[in-house]
């Protein structure tokens, strides 16, 4: 086995989940997905596709109808994006991996802003790159970016900068001024930017005209060294469908098509038909999802803020409450104890970065806000008994 693969850490989130799976008494909030089923029109489109016999290969870059629909959708939110910049992928994970494969060679330097979903630092490491992490700074339960530190970290030797905003797990969201400063700096250093913007619609600050988080697509040109990754998973309730897309400079599209061929050949046609339906019904699906998630956030966070020894703030974006537990030295051990002793399943902070040791992530995407209240009661009882 290659040493880079042998060096990869197993998922700490999965390790906690494995300790609680099969237990009906555990309230599980460890994975980053809603427990709400995909809307009926989206499911129906896939069923109809299968019944028509659409079970064959598609174009590497995706069905033209879906690429056109994605381009229209993106152009409603941001400056016009043509389908010549859109590549459909088998999920957001595949989108990110293909982007890294297109841009990174073994030995290249990659800078990633952390804490972050672990795939984003593992993917360049798998390819043999040197990954340097730039930590966000926690302040009273919130996380902030030190722009001067980023400018110092990203140099002409840096091949790729990876950013996830709105961020999993912290909820940190870039401001427009921060994005412009980052783009200007990376233009000067010749550094590519890979922006994971899958949570852009799950944005609660309400300070943008288009109803989504600030995007690099709002300020970049088509020829900038920028790749943006998206997914149908979060804002369309389609985690299991494995459908995502990339927005790339036109000159990169053919290379991305080749990489899709060598990775997955194409996304399944029936999943793509579901994606077309999701975009056709976007106005009735996504605003409702966002409003419900904001209600979940506004139910959970104030309850957590009342518990002694916790530091947490209301995230501007995403679907997570990320909180610090006073005196917790080992997030993984704490998360396992909460499973076995409180029947509460949360993700350990150190799954996302060493600087998040002592933190826990709670996915608040729950159909029933009563589950969130019950979960806080279990956490409160455990803290009373043990802290």
Image (cartoon, rainbow, N blue to C red):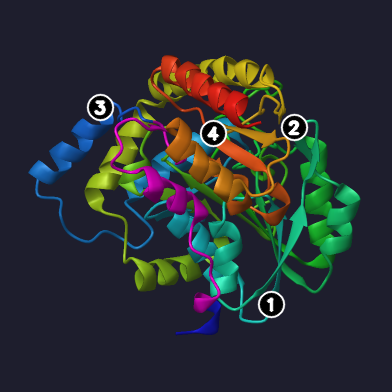
Residue 213 horizontal side relative to residue 293, left or right: right
Report which residue position mark 1 lands on. 108
Helix, strand or loop at mark 3: helix
For residue 6, side relative to residue 258 (left or right): right
Comparing labels 4 and 1, the label whose residue is closer to the camera: 4
Cα distance, mark 1 to mark 2?
A: 34 Å
| Pointer 1 or 2: first along the chain | 1
Q: CA distance from mark 1 to mark 3?
A: 44 Å
- Nearer to us in this view, 53 or 157: 157
Q: Mark 3 vs mark 4: which is more N-terminal?
A: 3
Q: Where does label 3 land, which residue?
A: 41
Q: Local crowd at mark 1 within 10 Å, few (<14), some, or many (≥20)?
A: some
Label 2 sits on a secondary structure element that is loop
CA gap, disc 3 and disc 4: 29 Å
First in sequence, mark 2 or 4: give its number: 2
Q: Which residues are magenta?
A: 5-34
Q: Is residue 203 visible?
A: no
Query: x, y (%) of residue 221?
Result: 69, 50
Whichever of callouts 4 and 1 sits on the residue coming sooner in the sequence is: 1
> Which residue was labeled with disc 4?
362
In the rendered structure, find residue 141 and report the number of the disc placed on it. 2
Quarter of the image for residue 311 reads top right
- Compared to residue 313, the image places residue 161 above or below, namely below
**Mark 2 neighbour density, 10 Å: few (under 14) some (14–19) many (20 or more):** some
Marks 2/3 in contact by CB < 8 Å: the verdict is no
Q: Does the magenta segment cover residue 16?
A: yes
Which quadrant is home to the C terminus?
top right
Say which quarter of the image contains residue 76.
top right
């Amino acid at each position: 086995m290659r040493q880079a693969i042998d060096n990869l850490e197993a998922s700490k989130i999965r390790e906690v989940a494995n300790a609680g799976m099969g237990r009906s008494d555990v309230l599980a909030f460890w994975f980053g997905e809603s427990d709400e089923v995909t809307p009926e029109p989206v499911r129906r489109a896939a069923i109809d596709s299968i019944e028509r016999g659409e079970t064959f290969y598609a174009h590497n870059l995706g069905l033209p109808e879906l690429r056109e629909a994605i381009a229209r959708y993106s152009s409603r939110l941001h400056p016009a994006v043509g389908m010549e910049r859109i590549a459909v992928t088998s999920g957001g994970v595949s989108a990110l991996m293909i982007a890294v494969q297109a841009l990174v060679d073994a030995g290249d330097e990659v800078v990633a802003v952390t804490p972050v979903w672990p795939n984003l630092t593992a993917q360049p490491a798998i390819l043999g790159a040197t990954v340097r992490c730039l930590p966000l700074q926690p302040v009273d339960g919130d996380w902030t970016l030190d722009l001067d530190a980023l400018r110092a970290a990203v140099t002409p030797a840096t091949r790729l900068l990876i950013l996830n905003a709105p961020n999993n797990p912290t909820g940190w969201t870039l401001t427009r001024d921060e994005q412009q400063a980052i783009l200007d700096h990376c233009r000067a250093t010749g550094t590519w930017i890979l922006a994971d913007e899958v949570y852009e619609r799950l944005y609660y600050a309400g300070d943008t005209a288009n109803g989504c988080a600030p995007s690099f697509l709002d300020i970049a040109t088509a020829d900038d060294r920028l790749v943006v990754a998206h997914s149908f998973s979060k804002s369309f309730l389609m985690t299991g469908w494995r459908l995502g897309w990339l927005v790339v400079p036109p000159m990169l599209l053919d290379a991305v098509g080749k990489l899709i061929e060598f990775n997955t050949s194409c996304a399944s046609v029936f999943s793509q038909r579901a994606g077309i339906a999701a975009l056709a019904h976007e106005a009735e699906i996504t605003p409702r999802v966002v409003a419900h998630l904001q209600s979940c956030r506004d139910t959970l966070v104030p309850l957590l803020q009342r518990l002694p020894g916790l530091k947490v703030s209301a995230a501007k974006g995403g679907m997570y409450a990320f909180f610090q537990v006073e005196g917790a030295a080992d997030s993984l051990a704490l998360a396992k104890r909460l499973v076995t002793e409180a029947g509460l399943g949360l993700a350990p902070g150190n799954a996302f970065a060493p600087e998040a040791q002592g933190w826990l992530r709670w996915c608040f995407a729950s159909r029933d806000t009563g589950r969130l209240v019950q979960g806080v009661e279990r956490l409160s009882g455990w803290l009373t008994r043990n802290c």
